[in-house]
Image: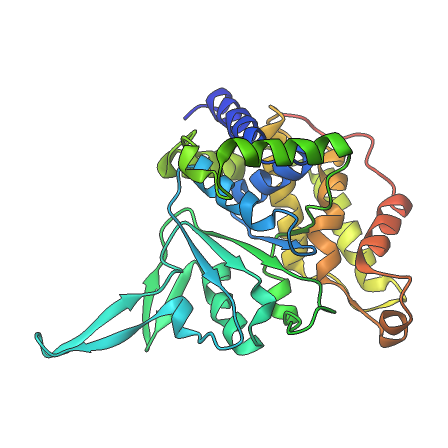
């Protein structure tokens, strides 16, 4: 697949999603960019704002196989990864694959299950493999997780462990509809479909193999100048030096920020990264990786998103950098 064809396919994906999901175009682009960067997305918002619907529409439009797991307090890790069962007719154990054996895993309300269950996804998300009873199985490409969670103050939720949060490339919110007209559009589309799930009406824009090729283009054919890399490093290091923070962003945060900046450049039709690509995704890529000092986390008024926004304002943007 050529660069121009990849850009056109990205445009078609965004256009088709927009025909079924009412939301900001920037939000839809961020989901696509995270997937192209071979990353994972955590939707954090209140119930009923379309998080699950967006994930299902995205999976259908991209032509990928997908499975859904509803996280509940009684869920077991093997319900996600799979297990081996004894077959009496053959006299041996055979693998019963769990829902992680897919291209897109929709982890719905991931923080409804305790950390033991959440940790079942750690190996899958980082290494694209799963170990079941000592045997390692590679997951198919592409593989990424679209997870939704309710705010942690909701009853019956468990906060995600720091190691789990660090594996999500972006944490974003769908938010409420911006205008009354948008909410009317949501109702009119639902009335037209005569059902809550419109995915059976959606024709895939691309295929799993073609989407994997676009991921390769985003990874290998987008140029990142050394000055842009230095800019990313300055942001990452600033998160560790901020006095309100106990733990700043890990190196994985810098890698994630660079990857989504490259993927965003592709969707915009450029084969090089600009500082604006980095600034656009810095808050969503880094804010969930910070651990605030207890004093500030309890008092409120300061959160990771605000701190990253302030860091972006304080750090000088490179004015000269190489373009391919």
Q: Nearer the viewer, residue 320 or 187?
A: 187
Q: How many marks?
A: 0
Up/down of 13 relative to 170, above or below: above
Q: Nearer the viewer, residue 166 or 72?
A: 72
Q: In which quadrant of the rendered image does the N terminus lie?
A: top left
Up/down of 163 relative to 314, above or below: below
| Image point (40%, 62%), residue name | 129
Up/down of 225 relative to 151, above or below: above
Residue 240 lies in quadrant: bottom right
Answer whether residue 306 is visible to the viewer in this image.
Answer: yes
Which coloring applies here? rainbow
| Image point (66%, 70%), residue name | 162
The image position of residue 256, as x and y in percent, is: 62, 50
Residue farthest left in this picture: 89
Q: In which quadrant of the rendered image does the C terminus lie?
A: top right
Compared across the picture, whether 157 is left or right of 137 comes to right
The image position of residue 189, as x and y in percent, is: 57, 32
Compared across the picture, whether 82 is left or right of 188 comes to left
Answer whether residue 273 is visible to the viewer in this image.
Answer: no
Q: Nearer the viewer, residue 282 or 145?
A: 145
| Image point (87%, 46%), residue name | 315
Up/down of 91 relative to 297, above or below: below
The image position of residue 107, as x and y in percent, is: 51, 59
């Amino acid at each position: 697949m050529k660069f121009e064809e990849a850009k056109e396919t990205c445009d078609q994906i965004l256009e088709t999603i927009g025909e079924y999901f009412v939301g900001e175009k920037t939000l839809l682009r961020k989901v696509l960019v995270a997937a192209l960067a071979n990353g994972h997305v955590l939707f954090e918002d209140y119930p009923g704002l379309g998080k699950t619907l967006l994930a299902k529409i995205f999976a259908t439009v991209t032509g990928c196989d997908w499975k859904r797991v509803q996280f509940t307090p009684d869920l077991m890790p093997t319900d996600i990864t799979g297990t081996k069962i004894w077959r009496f007719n053959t006299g041996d154990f055979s693998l019963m694959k769990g829902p992680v054996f897919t291209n897109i895993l929709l982890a719905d309300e991931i923080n409804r299950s305790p950390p033991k269950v959440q940790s079942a996804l750690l190996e899958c998300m980082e290494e694209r493999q799963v170990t079941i009873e000592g045997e390692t199985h590679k997951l198919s490409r592409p593989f990424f997780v679209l997870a939704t969670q309710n705010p942690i103050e909701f009853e019956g939720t468990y906060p995600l462990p720091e190691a789990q949060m660090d594996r999500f490339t972006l944490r974003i919110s769908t938010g409420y509809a911006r205008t009354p007209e948008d909410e009317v559009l949501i109702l009119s589309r639902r009335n037209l479909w005569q059902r809550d799930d419109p995915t059976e009406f959606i024709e895939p824009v691309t295929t799993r193999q073609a989407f994997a090729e676009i991921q390769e283009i985003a990874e290998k054919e987008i140029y990142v100048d050394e000055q842009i890399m230095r800019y990313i490093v300055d942001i990452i290091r600033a998160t560790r030096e901020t006095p309100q923070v106990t733990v700043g962003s890990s190196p994985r945060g810098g890698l994630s920020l660079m990857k989504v900046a490259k993927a965003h450049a592709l969707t915009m039709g450029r084969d090089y990264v600009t500082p604006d690509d980095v600034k656009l995704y810095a808050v969503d890529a880094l804010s969930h990786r910070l651990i605030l000092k207890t004093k500030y986390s309890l008092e409120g008024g300061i959160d990771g998103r605000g701190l990253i926004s302030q860091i972006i304002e304080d750090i000088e943007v490179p004015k000269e950098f190489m373009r391919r």
